[in-house]
Image (tube, helix red, strand yellow):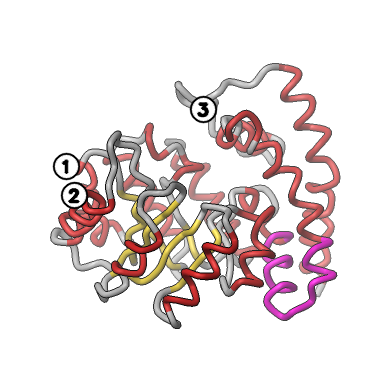
């Protein structure tokens, strides 16, 4: 990890107004991080975004998840984020056992990330009986199911859109207060402005900004979302933040990919810079 560059990035994001960080999660190549790399990312985020809520990502083998959970509070985490499990032969009962075992080793509250049929919506509602489960990052883009589930929750838990800007407006209409964002690493002011517009009911402005940002997320979703990390890591070099190439088995970009991303980013980065300059003059 390039600690100096990461520190500068976190500080800049906090300065732009970001107040919740998920260091070491999916866009940060969670599945390629060691336990120490994961916790170092949490510690650095806490140091350079002292006002923010910081969630430590846990997942993978149960021993790894427990090891992170045991140390996350000391590293500065406010909560855990249970990443989607990639084990074969998953079941609701197995996920419940996994969550309970990890929580047995920490006093931190937790958010669960759903991007597949397991855990089921029925299990999410059952998990709300545990006061340590405070919410969900919901990334199965079935809006009818999401609305039914959030209605059944009857005000319990925080239900966040886990599918970024392309889907955020529709989740917010269904009751989500907000969304997670990878594009926000590149254009934090634009995505915060989009969220603010949608939150105050200014759908025209919110959708204008959504259409501006959405090409980033559409590109990342190509070919089974296999560009998710590699596109963003390359794009960060366009804002002088070279975190290096993605680690295998993540997709490596071709020169043609890079040229296409360069063209895609031009209007987005220009708008982000204009917004930064406008706010600096106020």
Label 2, secondary structure: give it.
helix
71 up-or-down from 127: above or below: above
Label 2: few (<14), some or many (≥20) within 10 Å?
A: many
**Mark 2 vs mark 3, CA separation in Å:** 26 Å
**Mark 2 vs mark 1, CA separation in Å:** 5 Å
Q: Main secondary structure of the magenta part?
A: helix
Q: Residue at x 47, y 69 (%)?
A: 149
The residue where tag 3 is placed is 246
Part of the protein shown in magenta: 190-208
Quadrant location, the C terminus: bottom right
Which numbered mark, 3 or 1, is in the foreground of this view?
1
Question: For this view, does 185 lie left or right of residue 133?
Answer: right
Q: Residue 278: say if magenta.
A: no
Contact between labelled residues 1 and 2, with CB atoms less than 8 Å apart: yes
Contact between labelled residues 3 and 2, with CB atoms less than 8 Å apart: no
**Mark 3 vs mark 1, CA separation in Å:** 25 Å
């Amino acid at each position: 990890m390039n600690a100096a560059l990461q520190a500068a990035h976190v500080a800049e994001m906090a300065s732009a107004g970001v107040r919740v960080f998920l260091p070491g999660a999916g866009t940060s190549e969670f599945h390629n991080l060691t336990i120490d790399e994961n916790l170092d990312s949490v510690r650095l985020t806490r140091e350079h975004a002292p006002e923010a809520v910081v969630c430590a990502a846990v997942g993978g083998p149960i021993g790894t998840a427990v090891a992170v959970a045991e140390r996350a509070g000391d590293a500065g985490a406010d909560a855990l984020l249970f990443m989607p499990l990639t084990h074969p032969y998953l079941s609701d009962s197995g996920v419940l056992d996994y969550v309970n075992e990890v929580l047995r080793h920490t006093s931190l509250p937790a958010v669960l990330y759903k991007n597949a049929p397991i855990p089921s919506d029925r299990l999410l509602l059952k998990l709300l009986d545990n006061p340590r489960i405070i919410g969900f990052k919901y990334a199965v883009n079935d809006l009818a199911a999401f609305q039914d589930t959030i209605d059944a929750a009857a005000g319990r838990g925080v239900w966040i859109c886990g599918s970024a800007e392309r889907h955020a407006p529709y989740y917010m209409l269904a009751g989500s207060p907000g969304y997670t964002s990878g594009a926000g690493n590149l254009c934090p002011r634009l995505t915060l402005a989009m969220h603010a517009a949608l939150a105050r009911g200014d759908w025209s402005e919110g959708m204008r900004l959504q259409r501006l940002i959405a090409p980033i997320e559409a590109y990342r979703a190509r070919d089974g979302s296999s560009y998710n990390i590699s596109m963003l890591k390359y794009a960060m070099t366009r804002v002088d933040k070279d975190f290096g190439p993605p680690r295998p088995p993540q997709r490596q970009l071709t020169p043609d990919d890079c040229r296409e991303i360069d063209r895609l980013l031009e209007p987005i980065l220009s708008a982000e810079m204009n917004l930064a300059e406008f706010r600096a003059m106020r």
